[in-house]
Image (spheres, grey):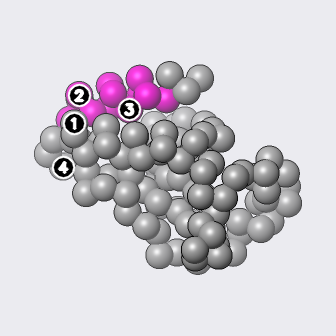
Amino acid sequence: MIPIGIAFFFKSTPDSRVIALYPSPAGATESLLDLPAWEELAADNPVLAQLEPDVEALLVNRVEGAREYYRVPLDQCYALVGLIRARWRGLSGGNEVWVAIHAFFAGLD
């Protein structure tokens, strides 16, 4: 149900729920979608239940056919947000931002 190619998910203790955010040129944008499938997804993938609340996130990259999933510190997700904000140009982002995004994910590998 997430319509964006890059998103990150983390358990927020103040909100008592999983939050989905999209890195964008405007910053981290919260998804307003209900996430009913999260519990089922976590049941099928026990590592998701082990994510440290407010500290670790599931970072998903589905851009250009990628199917990459990372367990990362939440600050890495916000580093990606900063990278996108700093390099985005025009409507599609421009070549520089996409080179940087691909390098970011390559660095996680």
**89 lies above or below 99:** below
Lateral position of residue 45 relative to residue 65, left or right:
right
Residue underneath mark 3: 101
Amino acid type shown at disc 1 = Arg
Magenta part of the chain: 94-105
Marking on residue 87 = 1
User: Residue at image x 23%, y 29%?
Assistant: 95
Mark 1–mark 2 CB contact (< 8 Å) = yes
The CA distance from mark 1 to mark 2 is: 7 Å
Whichever of labels 4 and 3 marks the residue nearer the N terminus, that label is: 4
Residue 59 found in image quarter: top right
The Cα–Cα distance between marks 2 and 4, rounded to whole angstroms, is 13 Å
The earlier-in-sequence mark between 1 and 3 is 1
Q: Residues within 10 Å of mark 3 (few under 14, many from 20)?
A: some
What whole-number distance in Å separates the C-alpha atoms at marks 1 and 3?
10 Å
Q: CA distance from mark 3 to mark 2?
A: 9 Å
Q: Which residue is mark 4?
A: 91
**Looking at the image, which residue is at 69% across and 75% down?**
36
Q: Is residue 45 visible?
A: no
User: From what the image shows, is residue 97 above or below residue 54?
Assistant: above
Q: Amino acid at mark 2?
A: Glu
Number of numbered labels in the structure image: 4
Percent x, y for residue 103? Answer: 41, 23
Q: Nearer the viewer, mark 2 or mark 4?
A: 2
Label 2: few (<14), some (14–19) or many (≥20) C-alpha neighbours in 10 Å: few
Q: Identify the residue under disc 2.
A: 96
